[in-house]
Amino acid sequence: MAQQSVTITTRQFARAQGIITNAVATPEGQMLAIKAIAPDMVVEIVKYNAADAEVGRLLRGASKEVREALAAVAPLAKFYDETREVVMTKSPGRTFLAASSFTTPDDLLGAAEDLEDVLEEHAASAWAKDLFKAMVGLLDSAVKEQGEASGALDALQKAQQCRADTAMLARPLFVRFRRVVRNTFGRESREYRSLLDRRQPGDEDDTSPPTTP
């Protein structure tokens, strides 16, 4: 199942559950085929809903971790830009790019670590002592938060793949269930048409995780 079908799949399974609930509530002798296939479909719906709920939980957690990483990287980037000018003045020949030139947080962290090394070399000097101490604190905080954000994003990606796999495994049964619904209610019925693979205006998927700068 393509990841862009998450919204459709979630909607379809919810509607399938509604059809099953209504079928089970009908008097004996009615909607027999739907009632017969319903338990199998319900099992798949429960699996999918659990996988979808896990994605939602991890998405909220990843968003929080990314926000915290951004909050830690911002002051580091500012202090890095301030400090690199001092270091390039005090250590001629040492060049450090501006923070704005880096495309990923890891690039900035790598450059900040290099700058920290130079400050450590001169830590005994009056000009470098306080800069080194401040850089260590900001860099340690940013590395910690960035690591936690990366871990949360990895977990989210795995959960999204698990949800996609769950939907893919349920797909053959869902197609058979849909055919039973078509044969029970008719091709033009609201029940059958509600299960077709159709996107609607405003459909969005949460397959794009929050990103760091």
Image: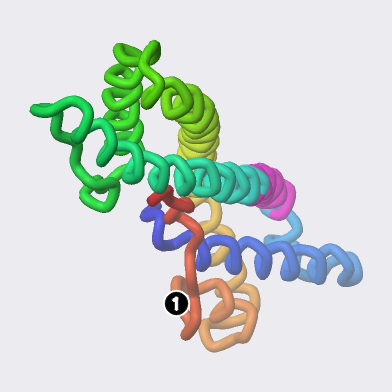
Q: Position of residue 4 (x, y in %)?
A: 40, 61
Residue located 46% across and 48% down the image: 74
The kind of secondary structure element at disc 1 is loop
Residue that carries the numbered disc 1 in the rendered image:
199
Q: How is the image coloured?
A: rainbow
| Vertical order, 57 against 28 (above or below) | above
For label 1, the crowd category at 10 Å Cα-Cα, with few meaning under 14, some 14 to 19 and many 20 or more, is few
Residue 70, percent across and down?
Answer: 50, 48
> What type is the residue that disc 1 sits on?
Arg
| Residue 46 falls inside the magenta stretch | yes
Q: Residue at x 84, y 63 (%)?
A: 24
Total labels drawn? 1
Q: Quadrant of residue 129?
A: top left
Q: Residue at x 54, y 30 (%)?
A: 141
Image position of 198 with respect to 130: above or below:
below
Q: Position of residue 112 (x, y in %)?
A: 33, 31
Look at the image and say whether residue 189 sits in the magenta stretch.
no
Front-lying residue, 198 or 195: 198
Residue at point 91%, 70% (across, down): 27
**Which of the two residues, 111 or 155, is positioned nearer the viewer here?**
111
Q: Main secondary structure of the magenta part?
A: helix
- For the residue pair 63 and 117, the one nearer the viewer reads as 117
Residue 94 shows in the view: yes
Horizontal placement of 146 versus 96: left or right? right
Coordinates of residue 206 in the picture (x, y in percent): 50, 59
**Residues in magenta, as a range:** 38-56
Above-or-below relation of 150 to 206: above
For residue 5, what is the image quadrant?
A: bottom left
Residue sitting at the far left: 93
